[in-house]
Structures are given as structure tokens and as C-alpha cells.
Amino acid sequence: MSGEAKADLNRPTPSALEEVTGSGRLEFDSFLGAVWLSPGAAALHGMAECGHLPLSQLLDRIHPEDRGLLTMPAPGSRLRCEYRLLGTECWIEARGGLVAAPDGQDVRLVALVLDVTERKTREARSRLVLREVEHRAKNALATAQALVRLTKAEDPRDFARSVEQRLAVLGRAHARLSTAPPGTGFSLRPLLEEAFGPYEASRTLVLRGPEMMLAAAAVQPVCMALHELATNAAKYGALSRAGGQVALRWRRTQTGGLVLAWRESGGPALTAVPGRRGFGLSMIEAVVHGQLGGRIRFDWAPPGLRLALSLPPSCVKASD
């Protein structure tokens, strides 16, 4: 036996190639309106039969929106398309071209088909990540612009210090978001504890509420609002005196939103509603109304500030 003959014997058969590559082959005869599927192509399409079949039997397995993609290409061109299988998450890629029939006319399409579901899943995940990053960056930029615009101080050094503190809060929130996969929820309790970190939270903070997860888009605005509230309490409210305390209680609403109640005690007695809104309160109202789409109500009670913060369901990560 010649060397060439031996090489032919060792050459893998088409069925063996399909098995090791996970591919298949289909042929489409436009004149007969029929297809021929190799065993690999039939398996990829979830079909029990291979060989010659009516075209309609193959099209029934393809998503209605994608059926028009598997068509005869123009003479001299090639087919390359990707289509979904009906009722599954599977994607198939077809690559092929026209071959001449015995009469010399290009009427038969021969194509290689491959399962590209894994690649399509990666691409979809990448698009989701990019959209999430873009959304978070826009939120961060809008918040940074607002805090620079609204921060007021007579001394440039005080101005710089105030802006730096607020940008640090924004940076920590962004770092928390950047390390989490898209769609991740963020527990409310750690965010509350972090806002009171500089003020001995273990002695000054009382937390009561169920485990609740914030949506990613709500994390930065909520962190900014909590920082401003804690700073205001440290300067003028309960945390400005030894023994002062802030109690926070929250609950989920019937519609899936969040209500958070803030109550200060042990600080200077409040005698009147502030005559003007400082930066902190202006920032709180801006992020609650503008970025979160929520509502906030202040009650300047003599024992200390009380407020109710209501956030819509879009700010809360639904339970899995």
C-alpha cells in the first residue's frame, strides 16, 4: 500500500470531524425546497432525524425572527449568519456558499454550522457590563458636579476640605460598585454603618430593619445622602454632644420600595426650622429627588431632627 493510500486511511471521516469539533453540515436545495442535515447538524438543532428533510422542518426549530437569515446568498457571495433556536438559549452560526449543481447552475447551498452559544453569552455579558459602567460613571459625574457646584465656604481651604470629603465618599461607593458583577444588590446595613464610621457608630447608632439590598444605581446617591446626614448630625445635631444618638429604622413597602426613618436624640434642642438650607440639606434633597426619584420629609422636632426617606422600587434589588 502506497504512502498516499495509508494517509487516506488515517484521514478522519466527516462524522469524526463533526464529533470532535461539535460542528455539522447542512445543504439546502432551493429548487426542491429541501435540506440535508448531517448527524452533527441534526444534533445541533435538536432534531432526531438527519439526512434529507423538508426545509419547513428545519425552520420550525429556528426562532421566527431569525428564519429569514438562512437564505441562499447571491451568486459569488458567501453566507454567514447567526440564529437562535426556538425555545432555547442556543445560538447557531452558519457559514457557507453556493456550489454548482450537475447542470452548472448554483442552486445548492452548503454550510458549516457551529454552536456559538458560549460566545454569544460572553458578548451579552460584556454589553451588560459596559452599560452598567457607563450608567455608574454618569451617576458619579453628575453627583461630583453637583457637590462642587453646591459646596459653599468662605475659606478656600474649607471649600477644598469639604469637596475632598464628599469626593472620598463618592470614591468609596464607586469602588464598591466596580468590584461587583452587574446586577448585584448591596446590603443597606453596611452602608449605614460606613456613613457613621468616623463617629463611633457602635455607641451612636441604633439600627433596626430587615435585610434589604439596594440596586447598584442607588448606592452612590444613598451614600452621599447618608454622609450629609451624618455630617449634619455631627456638626449641629445629636452627634455634636457626648451621649447623642441616631436611630435608623427601615422597612420594605408593599410596592417593593424602601422607607427609612431617621431620629436624633441627646443633642441640642431644636427651637425652630432652619432659616435657610445649607449645602448638606440641599445635596440630600437633590440626590433623593433628582437621582433616586424618592421623597424626603424633615421634621425639626425639639428633641432632634426626624426625617422620613421614601425610595421607589427601582432603588431596591428584588429578592431572588
Image (spheres, helix red, strand yellow):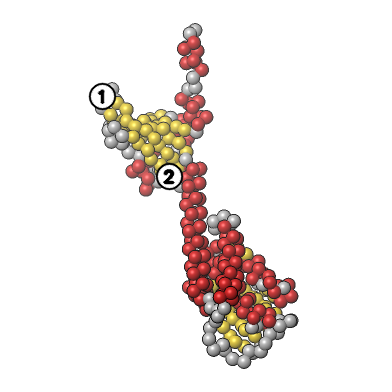
Q: Residue at x 74, y 75 (%)?
A: 203
Considering every residue shown, the one lying at the far top of the view is 1
On screen, 229 above or below 191? below
Relative to 40, 299 lies left or right: right
Figure check: 2 above or below 34:
above
Q: Amino acid at mark 2?
A: Arg
Q: SS class of the residue under badge 1?
A: loop
Q: Compare marks 2 and 1 and give the one earlier in the sequence.
A: 2
- The residue beneath circle 1 is 104
Cα–Cα gap, marks 2 and 1: 33 Å
Relative image position of residue 90 (x, y in whole percent): 47, 43
Residue 232 at least partly seen = yes
Q: From this viewpoint, is residue 210 visible? A: no
Q: Residues within 10 Å of mark 1 (few under 14, many from 20)?
A: few
Residue at horizontal 34 percent and vertical 32 percent from the top: 97
Q: Quadrant of the C terminus?
A: bottom right
Residue receiving disc 2:
84
Image coords of residue 212 (percent x, y): 61, 67
Residue 154 position in % (x across, y down):
55, 80
In the image, 56 versus 255, the foreground residue is 255
- Which residue occupies 46% across, 25% down? 14
Residue that extends furthest to the front in the rendered view of this protein: 156
Secondary structure of residue under mark 2: strand
